[in-house]
Amino acid sequence: MELRRFFVKNSDFDENIVTVSGAEFVHAVKVLRYKVGYKIILSTGDGWDYMAEITDVGKDYFKAKITSKTPNKGMPTHRVTLCQASLKGGKNDFVAQKAVELGASEIVFFDSENVTEKRVQKDRLDKIALEAAKQCHRAAKPEIKVSDFSKILELSKTAPTIAAYEDEEEFSLSVALEKLRDQKEIILVVGSEGGFTKKEAEALKDAGAVLVSLGKRILRAETAAVSLLAITMYELGEMNA
Amino acid sequence: MELRRFFVKNSDFDENIVTVSGAEFVHAVKVLRYKVGYKIILSTGDGWDYMAEITDVGKDYFKAKITSKTPNKGMPTHRVTLCQASLKGGKNDFVAQKAVELGASEIVFFDSENVTEKRVQKDRLDKIALEAAKQCHRAAKPEIKVSDFSKILELSKTAPTIAAYEDEEEFSLSVALEKLRDQKEIILVVGSEGGFTKKEAEALKDAGAVLVSLGKRILRAETAAVSLLAITMYELGEMNA
C-alpha cells in the first residue's frame, strides 16, 4: 500500500514522537480509519520525509513514532512563483492544484483590470494546495497569497519575470527562457480571462517583466498558466527523471 | 467586436455564397441573435479563414457572402496525436479542450488495464473540441477517436512515439524530444489515473515507444497530458510568436 503523507509542525515533535491533531488527525483517523501500527509519512516542510508508525490514537489526536528520515524527492530545486490574475468558475482551484503538482514554490492570485472574479477563496485554495502536495509527494505545501496588480509590479522587480501577453506578436517564450536557464528564481505572470490591458502590459514591461507570446492559438487563461509553468519547469530541468 | 468563427462544409458553398444550417445556424441566429449585415469567419477545415457577411436569415438557415480569405494562423504545422487512456469525472472533457488549444491534430481516447471509466462520450467530446477550436482560432476541429490499447500499440509503429510512464526512473522527456525536433509527426501516449501496468509499459516499448519520466513529482494523468503536449509543442516551435 502506498504510504500516505500528513503535514505537521515542528512544535508537534517531542524527540521522535509526533502528536498530530486538527484536520490531519481527522483525515487520518476519522476519514481513512488509520489505527495503531499503520505506517505513514510526516512532512514539516523542511525537505525531509519522516517515516513513522502510529503508536496511539486518542479522541482528537494521534501519536506516531519516527522510524527514519529520507530527503524528499518531490521538492523543486528552483523557486518559481506563479502569479495568476483571479479566474472565474473554479478555475483558481484548477490553477492552484496544477501549479503545486508542477512544482511552483508560491502561487499568488491577484486582482487586475479585467478580473471579474474579485473574490479569492484563500482557505479553499490552501486546502487544495495541501491535498495536491500530498498527492504529488511534495514535502511542503506551496504558499498561496492574495494580492493586487500593483504588488505584482513590485514583485517583478525582485526576480526575472516572464508575463504571458496575448497581444505580444514578436517575443517568444523560448527566447526568454534561454536567457533564464541559470536562474534559481523566476516569476511567471498570467492574466485573467480578459487578459491584461495595454496599460497593464506596459506597466509590467516597465517593471522589468519580459512579455511573451505563447503562440498563434489563443490559450484560455488557465491553459496558459499550466503550459507556461510546465514549459518553464522543463527548461529548468525540473521535469527530469 | 471580435469576429466569431463558424464551421461549414465545402458542400455549403455555392460560388461565394455559403448556406449555413444545423447547429452552427442555431448558435449564430438563435443563441447569438446574429442578423443580416453581421460579419463572421467561416472555416471548412482547409486551413483558410473565409471572411463573410450575413446576407439572409431564414427559419433554419442563414446565408453569408464571402468577402475575402486569409490563411488561418491557428493551424499547427506539425502533426501531434495525443493518445489518452480514458479518465474519470469529466477529465476527458478537460484533456480534449486543452489538447485542441495546444494544437493536437488528433486526440485518441483508449481503454487499457487500469482504466475504470470505459465509456467515452465521443459526441460530447466532439462538441467540446469544436467549441475549443472556435475559441482558440483554429480553422479545423481535431478529430476525436475512441480506441483500445492494442490499437495504440499499432499506432506507435507508424510515427515516433513518446509515452509518459510513472515508473520510468532514468529517461527524461528532454532527451527524447531532442531527438525528435525535426519530426513532422509525433504521437504522445498518457495513461489513466491508475497508470500503465508493467506489462503495458513493456508492450509500448516493444512497439517502439520511448518511455519517459515527467520528473519526481507525481503528476495527475490530466496534468501529465497537458504538460507533455505543451512541452512537446514548445520544443517543436509551435508555441512561438
Image: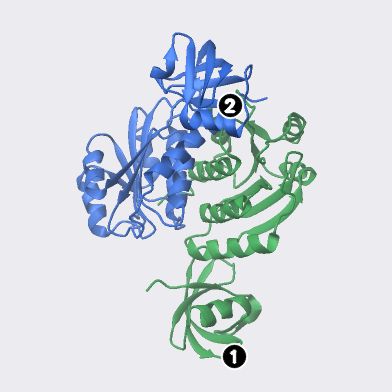
Chain colours: A green, B blue
| Nearer-the-camera pick, A190 or B3 | B3
Q: Is A168 above or below relative to B101? A: above
Name the spot of residue A213 as percent of width and height, x first.
59, 30
- In the rendered view, does A54 fall on the left or right side of A115? left
| Nearer-the-camera pick, A137 or A225 | A225
Q: In terms of secondary structure, where does tag 2 sit?
A: loop
Residue at 68% across, 64% down:
A123
* Disc 2 packing (10 Å; few <14; some 14–19; many ≥20): some
Q: Chain of mark 1?
A: A
Name the outermost residue toward the right: A150
Name the spot of residue B169 as percent of width and height, x first.
35, 55
Q: Which mark is residue A59?
A: 1
Label 1 amino acid?
Answer: Lys
Pointer 2 residue = B4
Q: Which mark is residue B173?
A: none
Q: Chain of mark 2?
A: B
Name the outermost residue toward the front: B59
Name the spot of residue B155 as percent of width and height, x first.
25, 39
- In the rendered view, does B124 fall on the left or right side of A117? left
- In the rendered view, does B240 fall on the left or right side of B32? left
